[in-house]
Amino acid sequence: MFNLAAFSTLLTLIPFATAQSAVWGQCGGIGWTGPTTCAAGSTCVPQSDYYSQCLPSSSTTIGSTTSPTGSSSAPGSTSTVTGLNTVAKAAGKLYFGSATDNPELSDSPYVAILSDTKEFGIITPGNSMKWDATEPSRGSFSFTNGDTIVNLAKANGQMVRGHTTVWYSQLPSWVSSGNFDNATLISIVQNHVSTVIGHWKGSIYAWDVVNEIFNDDGTYRSSVFYNTIGPAFVPTAFNAARAADPNAKLYINDYNIEGTGAKSTAVYNLVKSLKAQGVPIDGIGIQGHLIVGQVPSTIQQNIEQFTSLGVEVAFTELDIRMTLPATAALLDQQKNDYQTVISACNAVPKCIGVTIWDYTDKYSWVPSTFSGQGAALPWDENLVKKPAYDGIIAGWTQ
Ligand code: 9MR
């Protein structure tokens, strides 16, 4: 007679008896019932309590002196680091973090590293809190993808940066082409900011309330907000944000404000004026989309000027791109460039943390935007650490 119980037991034993996980596959972790041994040439390495991964044995030395886990030294390794967030916190910072995006969350080896709080203490949704994602038509809000990332962060014990409420880009045409008058657009901004920030009240460390509002020469960027409301759209957004979540840090965020210059001066002057008017603003987000070999020499000076206003500063979207292919010389220069940026933040107490704009070249925005450029992040397309990783560690520990 067929014995169902015995057959089921046999079935559960089969993977252990016959299978090995493929390279990059899962090989252990709490709740894992699959194979715990790895295909030839790879080794099972714990990434977290919940995820162990078969890593190619050779990957421990490719392009980096550190092991792929960040938690132990590989043969030939010269450092015994414990992760980017661990080291940033040991330097007195609040976090080291990464952006992510919903389509990437089906990639479990990727998620395992993203979820490792030794590496990342905070995550930022790259797209799912933007206006086109959250209010695609007027008064109709959608929080599903943002919720997914907030819930992942909560499960991991990570914080979240909210990005972003008022930005000229990724704006639905009902806003950008709505031809609203001043009063109507003000109420649309207030409703958007208060509804989005209110939805995630208590779950967000900091919000990029306004994003990329200046041109590189320091003048206001032309946008439906500036063109209709004038500069008053900025205090309108910050006041609505504070009312919606009094405990979230409220940031102005922009690129090309890493070093001193006209755009940094514009941000400095605006924040000074907002504070003088009693507008609630807590931080300046320096995006940090940089180019290998072209990192400004005035980063620390610029951060010091910003923090002299009584606000905190964070790098919010750091990546340092290069013209491909990535040669050993470029990767080494990139390592130095990451170290330069991180050590500038490290040197200023109110530079509270650094977020990279995703952590692996597999999901970087760079190649699709800048043809022929890429390799901007500290992990390569195979989730193997690059020399840049060691540059970040050096920046926090020097
Ligand atoms: O990473 C984001 C990418 O997936 C989007 O396609 C792109 C669209 O504009 O936005 C990217 O993120 C941007 C961020 O929101 C603001 N600063 C520049 C970032 C890179 O473009």
Image (cartoon, rainbow, N blue to C red):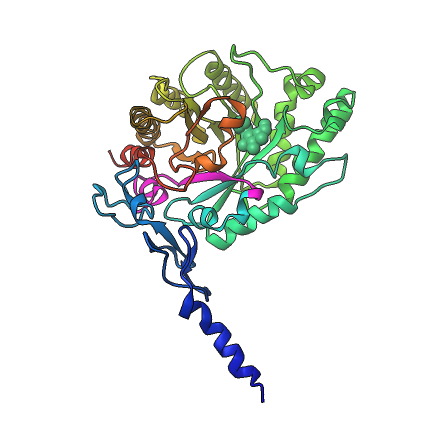
Measured from the top left, where is residue 185 in percent x and y? Answer: 74, 25
In the rendered image, the vertical position of residue 297 relative to residue 53, given as above or below: above
Q: Which residues are magenta?
A: 82-103
The N terminus lies in which quarter of the figure? bottom right
Q: Is residue 211 left or right of residue 62?
A: right
Determine the image quadrant of residue 221: top right
In the rendered image, the vertical position of residue 296 relative to residue 69, given as above or below: above
Q: Residue at x 32, y 52 (%)?
A: 41
Measured from the top left, where is residue 124 in percent x and y? Answer: 51, 39
Determine the image quadrant of residue 350: top left
Q: Residue at x 42, y 45 (%)?
A: 121
In the rendered image, the vertical position of residue 348 relative to residue 104, given as above or below: above
Measured from the top left, where is residue 222 in percent x and y? Answer: 64, 15
Q: Residue at x 52, y 10 (%)?
A: 217
Examine the structure image and report whether residue 93 is included in the region drawn in magenta.
yes
Is there any visible trace of residue 82 in the rendered image?
yes
What is the count of numbered marks? 0
The C terminus lies in which quarter of the figure? top left
Q: Nearer the viewer, residue 371 or 282?
A: 371
Q: Is residue 394 left or right of residue 198?
A: left
Determine the image quadrant of residue 87: top left
Q: Quadrant of ligand 1?
A: top right
Q: Is residue 125 left or right of residue 38?
A: right
In the rendered image, the vertical position of residue 279 relative to residue 380, given as above or below: above
Examine the structure image and report whether residue 22 is included in the region drawn in magenta.
no
Is there any visible trace of residue 252 in the rendered image?
no
Q: Residue at x 22, y 47 (%)?
A: 75
Q: Is residue 244 left or right of residue 182?
A: left
